């Protein structure tokens, strides 16, 4: 692959930001919802209280902000590289999500999950070896 077919430093940064912001956003949403507690269907008053707990939780708002920034980075990235490159390459975020879930939230990640995540990472490596842009 010659230099014109490589991912530029700017595009690599956009891809990294997309991955990290998405994983951090998901982590914050999960942590915020664990703090809110279980939301179950029920009478309108119970749902209203759950809604208030959700919209007043700072972690949830930080998660939403992180995911909005991820979306902006993703849009900019998609204006520069192929969709068929950006989406599979950003799948490395699944590994980051599992790692953060394990390290930060104390979630158990089974061997079969790690094996699946390993397969995803191998796919990311394969995609990363292809040119990021094949269209004009």
Image (cartoon, rainbow, N blue to C red):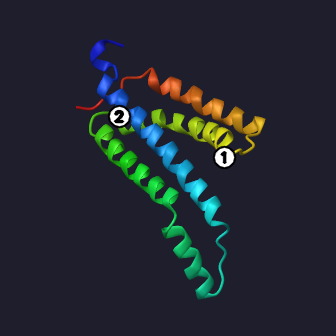
User: Where residue 101 sits in the image (x, y, percent)?
Assistant: 64, 43
Where is residue 118 drawn, in percent x and y?
Answer: 65, 30
Q: Is residue 77 visible?
A: yes
Judge from the rendering whether residue 135 lies leftward or rightward of residue 26; answer left or right.
Answer: left
Near mark 1 (Cα within 10 A), the count class, few <14, some 14-19 or many ≥20, is: some
Viewer-nearest residue: 33 or 15: 33
At a point 71% along the width and 32% down the height, the residue shown is 115
| Residue located at (67% from left, 68% from top) | 38
User: Which residue is labeled 2 in the image?
Assistant: 14
Q: Position of residue 29 (x, y in %)?
A: 54, 55
Is 57 drawn above or below residue 71 in the view shown? below
Nearer the viewer's eye, disc 1 or disc 2?
1
Q: Nearer the viewer, residue 73 or 132?
A: 73
- Can see residue 87? no
Q: CA distance from mark 1 to mark 2?
A: 26 Å
Give the secondary structure at mark 1: loop
Instruction: From this view, report whether residue 61 is shown above or below residue 78.
Output: below
**Quadrant occupied by the N terminus:** top left
- Which x, y percent locates residue 89? 46, 32
- The residue lying toward the viewer, choosing from 79 and 67, is 67
The residue singled out by tag 1 in the image is 105
């Amino acid at each position: 692959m010659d230099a014109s077919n490589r991912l530029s430093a700017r595009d690599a940064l956009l891809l990294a930001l997309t991955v990290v912001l998405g994983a951090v956003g998901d982590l914050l949403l999960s942590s915020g919802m664990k703090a809110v507690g279980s939301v179950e269907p029920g009478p309108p008053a119970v749902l209203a209280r759950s809604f208030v707990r959700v919209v007043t939780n700072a972690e949830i708002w930080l998660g939403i902000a992180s995911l909005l920034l991820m979306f902006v980075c993703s849009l900019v990235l998609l204006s520069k590289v192929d969709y068929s490159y950006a989406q599979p390459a950003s799948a490395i975020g699944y590994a980051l999500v599992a790692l953060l879930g394990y390290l930060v939230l104390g979630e158990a990640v089974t061997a079969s999950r790690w094996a699946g995540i390993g397969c995803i990472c191998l796919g990311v490596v394969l995609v990363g070896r292809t040119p990021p842009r094949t269209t004009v």
